[in-house]
Image (cartoon, rainbow, N blue to C red):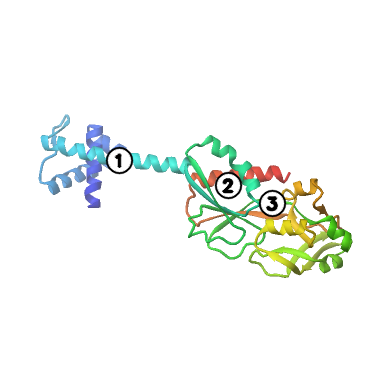
Amino acid sequence: MLDQLKRMAVFAAVVRQGSFAGAARELRTSTSAVSQQVRALEQDMGVTLLHRTTRKLSLTPAGERFHAGCAAMWAAAEQAQLQLAQLRDAPEGELRVAMTVGFARVLGPALSGLLARHTGLRLHLQVEDGFTDLVAHRIDLAIRFGRLPDSAWVAQRIGQIRVGVYAAPAYLARHGVPTQPEALEAADWLLLQDGTDLPRRVQTQGPGGARELRLQARYSSNNQLSLQQLCEAGLGLAMLGDEDVAEAVAAGRLLALQTDFALPDLPVWAMTPQRDGQPAKVRHAIEALKNHLSGVGA
């Protein structure tokens, strides 16, 4: 069947070009190969499709009727290729993104321009702070942070988020402001249960060089927003993104601790299925996120 379809395509090219030589140039093959394909097609069909003279080719009555179907097949193949190229080059269809609750404040502004320019692009958010089953939810793009667990998905770093240590004024009033490493390790910590081990080991950088802090969680959650709310309630210290808590800091609900040790930025990763080529909707979304995060982190 596949050989027959190939011969029909060659026959359509011969008619379209008006000669075996013209079809050979279009198909990037030899004139003899084109002639052989047409002869084989005629033998298989049991009819003569072309009248051949030294000057020109012309269709037989059977060839005219048969060519209509061959031409339609060729047009359908070209249309399918065009649609695939559009899917590859222009973002359209549904983009399914898995992300944390708090990252919506970044994703919205980052993708708003892309969605406005491409009205054929739709967005579905799978919002969970835990690890979503990316395959079951047909996820195109997952946004992850920090250290990644082993996965068959492809991860690329698209930016970073500045992280600080925050506490409510009420907690600091009761326990004082911990500035030294030992005091930080002894504090009540609210930590995100993100699939990595607790207690959390955090590499910090201070005047005396790098130091690892070993933080024990008194409170933990798989949801970053809930940790921020507990932190605002005065239950302890939390490592939170500066952008995420800007409103709470401005309102006086949280204070940033000024310590001698700086926390490293939190890497932001775009995870995609392992494919040879990503759809345009995914490529454009990743690029938009990169651009936005580079502006936020500047």
Q: Position of residue 123 (x, y in %)?
A: 52, 45
Mark 1 belongs to which amino acid? Ala
Q: SS at mark 3?
A: strand
At a point 81% along the width and 65% down the height, the residue shown is 211
Residue sitting nearer the eye, 21 or 180: 180
Quarter occupied by residue 196: bottom right
**How far, Cα to Cα, is label 1 from label 3?**
46 Å
| Position of residue 161 in the picture relative to residue 6 (left or right) | right
Q: SS at mark 1?
A: helix
Quarter occupied by residue 59: top left
**Circles 2, 3 touching at the beta carbon (< 8 Å):** no
* 150, above or below 293, in the image: below
Residue to which mark 2 is pinned: 286
Which label number is shown at residue 160? 3
**Circles 2, 1 touching at the beta carbon (< 8 Å):** no
| Position of residue 42 in the picture relative to residue 177 (left or right) | left
* 16, above or below 272, in the image: above
At a point 71% along the width and 59% down the height, the residue shown is 227
Mark 2 belongs to which amino acid? Ile
Residue to which mark 1 is pinned: 76
| Position of residue 272 in the picture relative to residue 172 (left or right) | left
**Mark 3 neighbour class, 10 Å CA radius: few under 14, some 14 to 19, many 20 or more:** many
At a point 10% along the width and 43% down the height, the residue shown is 47
**How far, Cα to Cα, is label 2 from label 1?**
32 Å
**Circles 1, 3 touching at the beta carbon (< 8 Å):** no
Sequence-wise, which precedes: disc 2 or disc 1?
A: 1
Residue sitting nearer the eye, 182 or 64: 182
